[in-house]
Amino acid sequence: MTGPLISLRGITKTFGEGPTAFQALRGIDLDIRSGDFVAVMGPSGSGKSTMMNILGCLDVPTSGAYLFKGHHVEQLTRDERALLRRRYLGFVFQGYNLLARTSALENVELPLLYRGEAKKARQEAALAALRKVGLEEWADHTPAQLSGGQQQRVAIARAIVTEPEVLLADEPTGNLDTERSREIMQLLKRFNSDAGITILMVTHEEEMAAFARTTVKFRDGLVESVEDRKQPVPA
Amino acid sequence: MIAMLFTTLGLAMREIRRHLMRSFLTVLGIIIGVGSVVTMVTLGNGTTAAVQQQISSLGANILQIRPGQSFGRGGGGTQPQPFEVDDVDAIRQQVAGVVSVAPQVQSSGLAVRNAANWSTTIYGTTNDYVKAQSWTIDRGRIFSSEEERAGKTVCLIGATIRRNLFREDDPIGERIRIRDLSCEVVGALKSRGSSFGPGDQDDVVIMPVKAVQRRITGNQNVSMILVSVDPAYASDAVQDSIKALLRERRRLGPGKADDFNIFDTQQISETLQSTTRTLTALLGAVAAVSLLVGGIGIMNIMLVSVTERTREIGIRLAIGALGREVLLQFLVEAVVLASLGGILGLGIALGASILISPMLQIPFLFNPTINAVAFLFSAAIGVLFGYFPARRAARLNPIDALRHE
C-alpha cells in the first residue's frame, strides 16, 4: 500500500459566524495508514469529536483537504458522502445508537438493507457478524433486553457487517464498566488484526488507548502529538 | 429499488402496528371523511334510484292532469270543476301527439274473498291506462270493449291483492267483493317488483271506469286524466294543446288562471337528475374539506413522528442511507397510514349504507367508482401531506440527529 489511507491537510472547522464564531479545528495535518489502530485523545473541546465527524464524512471541513484513498472527500455532495459511508465506513457510538424495539438481528441487517442486499443474504451476513461478537444466541432480543456491553457488541456487529475499511468509534467504552470495556477493546483489536479494519477511536481512558498502536493527542483544535506505541496490549 | 420499496412497506406497517392507537387517531379524520362521503353518495344514489323507479312506474312520458291549481296554492275559492269522461274523449280525438288517454277514478275500500280481506286502492279506468302505466298481464286478460262500454263489474288485480286473497290459487274467474260489490277477476297483473315507500305499486284493483263511477263513487267525476305522449312530439307542445282544449271546455276566459294542472313525469325525472347532480357536487365539496382536515391530521402526526424518531433517522443517515431513502420511508408510511384510513372508511361506509338503506326504504347500490375514487383520494392525501414531514426527515443533519435526545 503506497501512501496513507486517510490524509488530512490544513483542516479547519469554524462553527457560527461573526463575533460568536468558534474555531473547533485550527489546521489539522494527519496521516492514517491502512490497518492502523488509532486512539484519539484530548480534553473536552479539543476538537477530537469534530474531527471524527469530518473523518466519518458526517460533516465537512470549513477549509483544508481530506483525502480518502487519494480522493478529495471535502468536494463530495451529501449523497456521495452517504454512499462513501455506506461503502467504506462503520460507526460505533458511545450511546450504542441501536434502533429501539428492533431485534439485534434487524439492527445488524440495517446497513445491508441500504446496500440493497437480498433478505436471505442480509440475514446470513448479520448472523455471522453477531457470531463474531459472540451474540448469535441473542439475535431475537431487542436493545431493551440486552445489557450495555451486549448492546455495544451489537453496534460493533452492525459496524463490521459491511466489511468496512475504516471503523470510527466515538468513546465506545464511555458508558461501560472496566470489565465490559476490556471486552469491547479486545473485540475491536481482533477486528483490527484479523480483518485488517483500520480503527479510529476516541477515548478518555489511557487503559483503552493502550490497545491502540498509534495515539493522537488533540489540544485546542490542533494535533499536539502523534505517538506510536512499541508494545500495544495484545488482543 | 423495488426490494427497497417492499422493505419500506414492511417498516411502515411495523411502525403503524407499534403505535396502533395513535395511528388510528391519526387517520380518524380520513376514516370519517371517506366514510361519510361514500355513505352519503351511496344513499343518494339509492334515493335517486328509488324515486326514479317510482316515477318510471307512473309510465314514461306520461302527463297527469288533475283538477285544481298547481301545487302549493291553498284552495281558497270554489271547488274546481272535476273532469268527466267526455274530457278524456275530447283530448284523445282533438290533440295531436297523444298515444293514449285514460281517465282515472280513484277510491279505496276493502277487498274480501272468503275469510281473507285486504284494504286496497280501487282505480276506475280503461285498457289504455293499463298500457300507459306499462302494466303486464300475468294471467287472464284485459277488459273487453263490451265490459268497458257497459261498465261491468270485472276487475284486474295487482300482485299484492292476489297474494293476500288467493295465495297460490288461480284467481281468474273467481269473484271478490269490493265494498258491497261482487266483482269477477278477469286478469292478474304482473308484479312491479320491489316497491319502496308507502306506495306499494302492486296493491291495486283496476275496474272499468263506468263500474266505479256508477257503483262505488256514485258520480260522473274523473279525478285524473292520464295522457301518454308520442315520443316523436315535444311534450311542451302537447301540453299546450291540452291546456288550450281544457280551458275552452271549462270556459275559462282570458286572464283567468288554469283550474287544473298538468304533471309531466319526464320533467320531474329531469329535475330530479339535475338536483342529484347538484347534490353530488355539494358532497364532493364536503369530501374535499373533510379529507383536507384528515390530511392535516396526518401531517401533524408525521411531523411529531419525525421529531420523535430523529435519532433513528440519524442512525440511518450515518450508516449510509441517502436522503431520498429516508424520504421514501416516511412518505410510504404516510401513504400506508392514509390508505388504511381510506379502507376503514370504505368499510364503515359499506356497513352504514347496508344498515341505513332499508330504514330509508331505498335500495343499496354499491358504487365501485366512488369507492375507488375515495380510496385513491385518501392515498393521494397521504402523498400530499406526508411529503413535507418526510422531506424534513430526509434533510436532517446526521450529527445533530444522532445527538438528539
Image (tube, coloured by chain):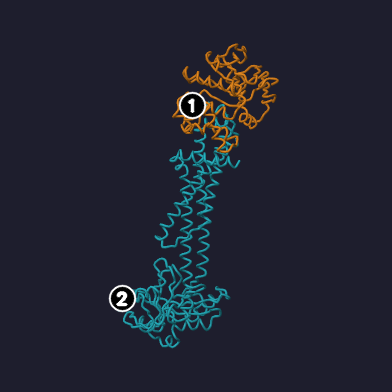
Q: Position of residue B110 (x, y in %)?
A: 33, 76
Q: Check residue B116 in the rendering and tell me which mark sits there, or answer none.
A: 2
Is any atom of residue B213 visible in this view?
Answer: no
Q: Within 10 angstroms of label 2, few (less than 14), some, or many (20 or more) residues? A: few
Q: Looking at the picture, tell me which residue is in the foreground, B290 or B66.
A: B290
Say yes or no: labels 2 and 1 on the same chain.
no
Residue closest to the eye, B258 or B142: B142
> Is the residue under label 1 in contact with that under label 2 (CB below 8 Å)?
no
Q: How many marks?
A: 2
Q: Position of residue A97 (x, y in %)?
A: 51, 27
Question: Is residue B22 shown above or below B158?
Answer: above
Residue bearing mark 1: A151
Residue nearest the observer in this picture, B26 or A144? A144
Label 1, residues with CA under 10 Å away: few <14, some 14-19, many ≥20 = many
Extreme residue in the left direction: B115
Can residue B58 be seen at all in this image of the molecule?
yes
Secondary structure under tag 1 reads helix
Q: Viewer-proximal residue, B190 or A1? A: A1
Q: CA distance from mark 2 to mark 1?
A: 86 Å
Q: Who's the residue at 44% across and 86% down the image?
A: B144
Amino acid carrying label 1: it is: Gln
Q: Quadrant of the N terminus of chain B?
A: top right
Find chain A in the image and tell me its colour. Answer: orange
Looking at the image, residue A165 sits to the left or right of residue B117; the answer is: right
**Residue type highlighted by circle 2:** Ala
Chain in cyan, by letter, is B
Q: Secondary structure at mark 2?
A: strand
Mark 2 belongs to which subunit?
B
Q: Quadrant of residue A25?
A: top right
Could you say where residue B186 lies in the image, as x and y percent from the top left? 40, 82
Q: Position of residue A18 (x, y in %)?
A: 62, 21
- Vertical placement of residue B225 versus A89, above or below: below
